[in-house]
Amino acid sequence: MPDTAEAIFARHRARVFAVAYRLTGSVSDAEDVVQETWLRWSGIDVSDIRAPEAWLTTAAGRLGLDQLRRTKARRETYIGPWLPEPIVEASSEIHQPTPEENLSLADDISIALLHMLERLAPEERAAFLLHEAFDYGYGELATLLGKSEAACRQIVSRARRRVADERPRFNADLEEHERLAAAFSNALAQEDPKALLSCFREDAVLYSDGGGKAAAALNPIYSDDHIARFFAGIQKKYSVPLDPMLITVNGGPGFALLHDGKMHSIMSVDIKDGQIATVYMMRNPDKLARASATLGIPLYQM
């Protein structure tokens, strides 16, 4: 008995979501793409489709690219740095991942990579991701983008060079992550500027995304001293110190910063040689709602 349209779609749903999330950097936009892909899939005779996975990937790619083109203009006028919507889990949690969490197909979804991909044009981003992460051929890209295969080769090659030049290559094991989390937490709680400074590399950078809905730095903050001062300034605003909770953000090290037991922000960090090299701080409440629900921590009313 042949599979139903529902069964086939359920089998490939994680891949559809993975394509959409990588293209848009937004869980809500990705879910919209998944829903629209399903509507298109359910409206055809699937028995005529020889390669359902390829059909669904192509449909999600087209819809994701359309969504990215629509949002690109809005992101150019976004208040402050734009950061992707985080996908989080408690670092101590061991469970069967949901389709949305099971995104690591052939490429990572780190905040650092998604943030860097924002610098690519929509067609460059789509071509790079579909070719590198989802094994799309140049002929398939040509059909999707309406360009020649030669042009698609050039687009992918150009995007690949930019990614190779700019993509961070830092990583940290769980033990190092936990040690740094404890050091960062103690430095904040004790309001110890010297200890806080020691958590960051001298050339560290911080990006803070409030989207005009929460207080955040409107420009990147450079250097360990300026970043330490930034966090010290935040601490002075509250009678209860911010408490960093160790979590996983998009598969990498991160923290949920809690204020009186409520979620103040989500931080993703790049760690190099035992210190924080880059901070991606999400404060926009629209991007924290799902993280709040996932971790069971109420949002701090900003």
Image (cartoon, helix red, strand yellow):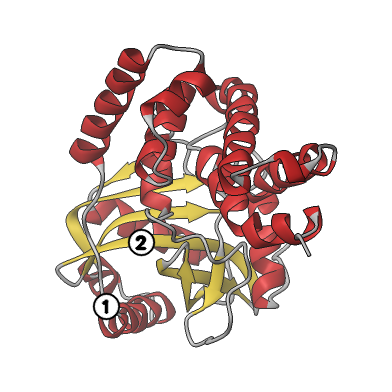
Q: Is residue 210 visible?
A: no
Residue sitting nearer the eye, 127 or 25: 127
| Residue that badge 1 annotates | 173
In this picture, is 268 found above or below 65?
below
Question: Percent x, y for residue 269?
Answer: 36, 61
Kindly state the secondary structure of the residue where label 2 is placed: strand
Name which residue lies at 55% across and 51% down.
Answer: 18
Residue closer to the observer: 23 or 190 = 23
- Mark 2 or mark 1: which is in front? 1
Question: Which is more toward the observer, 73 or 78?
Answer: 73
**Marks 2 & 1, CB-CB < 8 Å contact:** no
Query: Relative to 81, is 61 on the left or the right?
Result: right
SS of the residue at dot 1? loop
Q: Residue at x 55, y 67 (%)?
A: 88
Q: At 43% from the left edge and 80% from the top edge, which residue is drawn?
A: 189
Whole-percent x and y of residue 109? 43, 54
Mark 2 to mark 1: distance in Å?
13 Å
| Mark number, residue 278 | none
Q: Is residue 157 left or right of residue 128?
A: left
> 10 Å neighbourhood of mark 1: few (<14), some, or many (≥20)?
few
Task: Name the residue that disc number 2 marks.
Answer: 269
Query: In the image, what residue type sits under mark 1?
Result: Asp
Say if 178 sits above or below 130 in the image.
below
Compared across the picture, whether 223 is left or right of 23 comes to left
What amino acid is found at the position of numbered circle 2 in the picture? Val
- Report whether residue 86 is seen: yes
The image position of residue 159, as x and y in percent, is: 30, 29
* Residue beneath the point at 64% across and 50% down: 27
Q: Residue 10 placed where, x, y %? A: 71, 61
> How many marks can you see?
2
Quadrant housing the C terminus: bottom right
